[in-house]
Image (cartoon, helix red, strand yellow):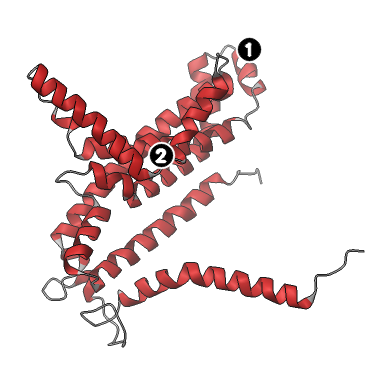
Amino acid sequence: MARSAPAPFVWGYRAYVLAFFLFLAAPLVAAGTFAFNDSLFPALPWQGFTLDWFFNDTEPKLGMFHDRRLLRGLYYSFVIAIFVSTLSVFVGTTNAFLFVRGQFPFKNTLYIVMVIPLVIPGVILGISILVIASNMANYFDRGLGIDLDFLRPGIFLVVLGQFSFITTITSLVITARLKKFDATMEEAALNLGATRLRVLRTITLPFLRPAMIAAGIVAFLVSFENFNTTLFLVGSEAPLTITMYDRMAKVGSTPVLNAVSFFLMVGSGLLALVSIAVQRDKTVR
């Protein structure tokens, strides 16, 4: 019969778990709370409940839904995240088939190379892509007289920078799902006369769909909140993270930034729940 742990150990473990979750949740709770404080400063004392930091259309309490700069940053973040998640899911799916079904030399080495971007700091990725792109743009401009403006800091480079490591995440998620697939289902369909394209469309991809949707949501969220890589590649079309950083650096912390943070927390939480839901295997009732 297994012996139970000593009471001091149990209570110490529970205290540690409680402290850990408080450490994670306290900043989020504070940011969300001050988004509703009827004060010009995100600090105590509590001045009363208000929704002005979301919906008010006049200064000094200009709400986030009337702040054109914040809305423009939200729009750019959304556009970038859509492009990055779409490309990452597409390439991640092809990578999954390549590494699960393909047989070729140096397969394990290429798999490690695919994973490497996850462990490279975002700052290094951003600087590296910026240097390479700028050198290429300067070479074509000075040597050939061709202006490749898309290689200058802007949305294209931001998408490229985020894609360089987010596609690794989607590849791993979809690869894990594909490894669980029963290949005999494809063989049976082929024996019955189905084409490979039809088998892919009606059997394989539907099986991968939950992982593809979940990977797309994760890619969207990671792209939307990315800062380190984006900071070095952004141009005049600044996404929300850069806009908030610039606002914080110039004006300091304001309740409208807490309102944006609360909005993002709620949106991220809902998308995370959707991601969890779509990954559950549906059982026949």
What residue does disc 1 label? 191
| Res. 166 mark | 2
Q: Position of residue 189 (x, y in %)?
A: 60, 18
Nearer the observer: mark 1 or 2; the answer is 2
Q: Nearer the viewer, residue 265 or 191?
A: 265
Q: Indicate the quadrant where residue 3 lies.
A: bottom right
**As drawn, 33 above or below 221:** below
| Pointer 1 local density, CA inside 10 Å: few below 14, some 14–19, many at least 20 | few
Q: Amino acid at mark 1?
A: Asn
Residue extending farthest right: 1
Q: Nearer the viewer, residue 136 or 26?
A: 136
Which mark is first along the chain, 2 or 1? 2
Q: Position of residue 164 (x, y in %)?
A: 37, 34
Q: Amino acid at mark 2?
A: Ile
Q: CA gap, disc 1 to disc 2?
A: 38 Å
The answer to whether residue 218 is visible is: yes
SS label for mark 1: helix
| Pointer 2 local density, CA inside 10 Å: few below 14, some 14–19, many at least 20 | many
Q: Position of residue 283 (x, y in %)?
A: 64, 44
SS label for mark 2: helix
**As drawn, 283 above or below 57:** above
Q: Nearer the viewer, residue 207 or 6?
A: 6
Left or right for 221, reference 182? left
Residue name at image x 25 percent, y 82 percent: 38
Q: How many marks?
A: 2
Q: Indicate the quadrant where residue 58 lies.
A: bottom left
Quarter placement of the N terminus? bottom right
The answer to whether residue 146 is visible is: no
| Res. 271 mark | none
Left or right for 208, reference 242? right
Residue name at image x 49 percent, y 70 percent: 23
Q: Position of residue 138 (x, y in %)?
A: 14, 26
